[in-house]
Structures are given as structure tokens and as C-alpha cells.
Image (cartoon, grey):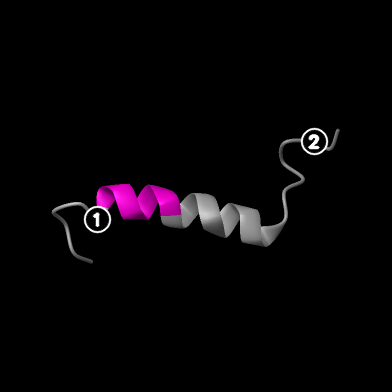
């Protein structure tokens, strides 16, 4: 298995969007 830090950019973007999506509940950027 690869290192957890060796993640493709799209995967990081997906995680980022997921976190932002949860935070966006009731908060519009």
C-alpha cells in the first residue's frame, strides 16, 4: 500500500470538497 501522504490531487480535492460541503451547511462562502 502507498503512504497515506502519497494521495493523488483529485482525492485530496474530493476530501476538501466533502469537508467544505459539510461546513457549508448554513454557511455560504
Task: Tell me which label, 2 or 1, sits earlier in the chain.
Answer: 2
Q: Position of residue 5 (x, y in %)?
A: 72, 41
Q: Position of residue 6 (x, y in %)?
A: 77, 45
Residue extent of the magenta highlight: 18-23
> Which element type, helix, strand or loop, lies under badge 2?
loop
Name the residue that disc number 1 marks. Answer: 24
Mark 1 surroundings: few (<14), some (14-19) or many (≥20) residues within 10 A = few
When asked about the image quadrant of residue 4, the answer is: top right
When asked about the image quadrant of residue 1, the answer is: top right
Residue extending furthest left?
A: 26
Label number found at residue 3: 2
- The residues bearing labels 2 and 1 have C-alpha atoms spaced at a distance of 30 Å
Disc nearest the viewer among 2 and 1: 1
Main SS type for the magenta part?
helix
Is residue 11 a member of the stretch shown in magenta? no
- Labels 2 and 1 touching (C-beta < 8 A): no
Q: Position of residue 23 (x, y in %)?
A: 27, 49
Q: Position of residue 28 (x, y in %)?
A: 18, 64
Determine whether, in the image, residue 24 is placed left or right of residue 5. left
Amino acid at each position: 500500500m502507498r503512504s497515506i501522504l502519497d494521495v493523488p490531487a483529485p482525492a485530496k480535492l474530493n476530501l476538501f470538497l466533502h469537508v467544505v460541503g459539510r461546513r457549508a451547511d448554513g454557511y455560504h462562502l
